[in-house]
């Protein structure tokens, strides 16, 4: 009997989706079909690919309400917010489609008498995309759409927590008339996914997930020198300077910390506030967080849903309790929220003041609705603390002084640096990380570079 995956809904603990896992024969068949289809797909003009993929985006967007409900049941994000993932998907997909004809055009170094010379941006072949549950469409679209636009075939393995997302991708591509085999999905367990990479049957791996899993992917890919793009963890900092608009900073930093129940790689997990405005910021931040409504994510009034599973919520509970025992102050009374007991995925949001880097909550990825706020005396101290991390995905500064922001940004070790905003991906900018946040790049013109390889043509035309 075939092994099966089960999506246990954090809403009520029920089995929301159940699917058979692909066996070895099905994996082999899918990869062979991808290889055959890619050979024909790469010969289709980029402009024609753009038409097909634009139709797929249209078909996907038409399912907005259904997709929002499915996200809520699969991973717990409130339906009132889940629709925003469809908008983000559309923005990124359409941008990457739009720029593809120019970005993928041949590179011509200039005329040289008697020669024709150019560099072709050739597709890699078959791209294996491994996507997580926390932003199931936004993380996947970063690789799926540009990989297809570049002439590759794509095989998608989505998280067992969000299997319907892979199926929704497939439905949109079928509706658009994408040739059979160019895009496929496989429901796979972790071991089978690693085995697929180790086999060398794909040409590139785009992985989004934990640092631990990223090491396994990197090790498996190294056996065949496969290219790998890794988007891993984050412990993203915000620095509120003395000249910041405190109300604006409090509203947006707290949104960056608690949106999606804090389950975001680029969410705000630690905040450094100048001593001159520390108390004002805390007061405004607490007021903002106390507006959240924790509850059933399928109900329209909910603004904070459950975490993906009870064990993840317990991890955050432990981090918070350790910090308080070490001297941190918990500023939000949990009694204001209808929370569950230990083991429940329903967890009240928490702001911890007077924290230090001796506490796990300031150094270890929390991935939940908790944020530590620490007082600093200068830009220099804030920069030192922001860089005191194993991660480097995004960082933000909140200030009225653009020149100061740029100076700080030059010194902060991060993939993306923001001023007066956070927790957002602009598809025109490279999405990348440093240190344990990963390697490689998606989105923007630069994102196409890892999905193609340069092939030089040097033709002597006069003999």
Image: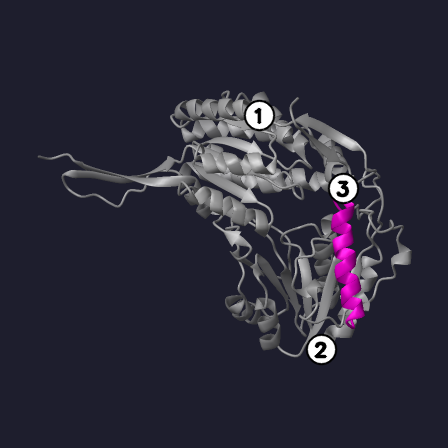
Numbered disc 3: secondary structure: loop
- In three-dimensional space, the C-alpha distance between marks 1 and 3, rounded to whole angstroms, equals 29 Å
Residue receiving disc 2: 275
What are the residue bounds of the magenta stretch?
A: 307-328
Disc 1 or 3, which lies upstream in sequence?
A: 1
Magenta stretch: dominant secondary structure: helix
Secondary structure of the residue carrying numbered label 1 = loop
Q: Residues within 10 Å of mark 2 (few under 14, many from 20)?
A: some
Q: Residue at x 84, y 41 (%)?
A: 296
Quadrant of the rendered image containing residue 363: bottom right
Q: Are marks 1 and 2 in contact (CB under 8 Å)?
A: no
Camera-side residue: 442 or 391? 391
Asked if residue 26 can be seen in this view, the reply is yes
For disc 1, the marked residue is 23
Magenta stretch holds residue 321: yes
Compare residues 322 and 68 and report the one nearer the observer: 322
Task: Name the element at disc 2.
Answer: helix
Colour basis? one colour
Left or right, 167 with respect to 219, comes to right
Say which quarter of the image contains residue 225: top left
Q: Which of the 4 quarters of the picture holds residue 373?
A: bottom right
Q: Is residue 149 above or below residue 372?
A: above
Residue located beneath label 3 in the image: 76
Q: Residue at x 83, y 54 (%)?
A: 348
Q: Residue at x 53, y 20 (%)?
A: 177
- Which percent across, then down, holds residue 285? 78, 64
């Amino acid at each position: 009997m075939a092994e099966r995956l089960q999506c246990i809904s954090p809403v009520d603990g029920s089995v929301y989706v159940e699917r058979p896992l692909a066996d070895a024969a099905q994996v082999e068949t899918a990869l062979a079909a991808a290889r055959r289809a890619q050979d024909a797909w790469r010969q289709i003009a980029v402009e024609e690919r753009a038409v097909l993929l634009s139709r797929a985006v249209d078909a996907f967007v038409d399912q907005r309400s259904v997709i929002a409900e499915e996200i809520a049941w699969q991973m717990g994000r409130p339906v009132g917010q889940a629709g925003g993932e469809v908008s983000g998907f559309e923005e990124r997909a359409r941008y990457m489609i739009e720029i593809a004809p120019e970005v993928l055009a041949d590179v011509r170094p200039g005329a040289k008498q008697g020669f024709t010379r150019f560099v072709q941006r050739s597709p890699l072949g078959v791209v294996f995309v491994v996507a997580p549950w926390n932003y199931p469409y936004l993380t996947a679209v970063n690789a799926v759409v540009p990989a297809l636009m570049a002439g590759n075939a794509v095989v998608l393995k989505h998280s067992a927590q969000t299997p319907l997302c892979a199926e929704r991708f497939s439905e949109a591509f079928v509706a658009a008339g994408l040739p059979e085999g160019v895009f496929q999905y496989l429901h796979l367990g972790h071991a089978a996914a690693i085995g697929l990479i180790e086999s060398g049957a794909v040409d590139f791996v785009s992985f989004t997930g934990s640092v631990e899993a990223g090491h396994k992917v990197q090790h498996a890919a190294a056996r065949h020198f496969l290219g790998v793009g890794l988007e891993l963890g984050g412990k993203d900092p915000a620095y509120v300077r003395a000249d910041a608009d405190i109300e604006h900073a409090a509203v947006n930093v707290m949104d960056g910390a608690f949106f999606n129940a804090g389950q975001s790689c680029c969410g705000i997990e630690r905040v450094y506030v100048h001593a001159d405005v520390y108390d004002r910021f805390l007061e405004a931040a607490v007021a903002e967080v106390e507006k959240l409504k924790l509850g059933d994510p399928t109900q329209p009034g909910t603004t904070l849903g459950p975490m993906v599973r009870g064990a993840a919520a317990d991890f955050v509970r432990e981090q918070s309790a350790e910090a308080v025992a070490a001297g941190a102050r918990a500023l939000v009374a949990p009694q204001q929220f209808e929370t569950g007991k230990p083991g429940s995925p329903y967890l009240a949001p928490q702001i911890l003041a007077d924290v230090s880097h001796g506490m796990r909550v300031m150094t270890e990825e929390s991935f939940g609705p908790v944020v530590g706020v620490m007082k600093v005396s200068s830009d220099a101290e804030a920069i030192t603390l922001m860089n005191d991390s194993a991660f480097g995905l995004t960082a933000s500064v909140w200030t009225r002084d653009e020149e100061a922001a740029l100076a700080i940004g030059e010194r902060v070790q991060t993939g993306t640096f923001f001023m007066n905003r956070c927790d957002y991906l602009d598809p025109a900018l490279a999405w990348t990380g440093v240190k344990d946040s990963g390697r490689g790049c998606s989105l923007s013109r630069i994102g196409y570079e890892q999905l193609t390889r340069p092939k030089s043509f040097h033709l002597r035309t006069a003999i």
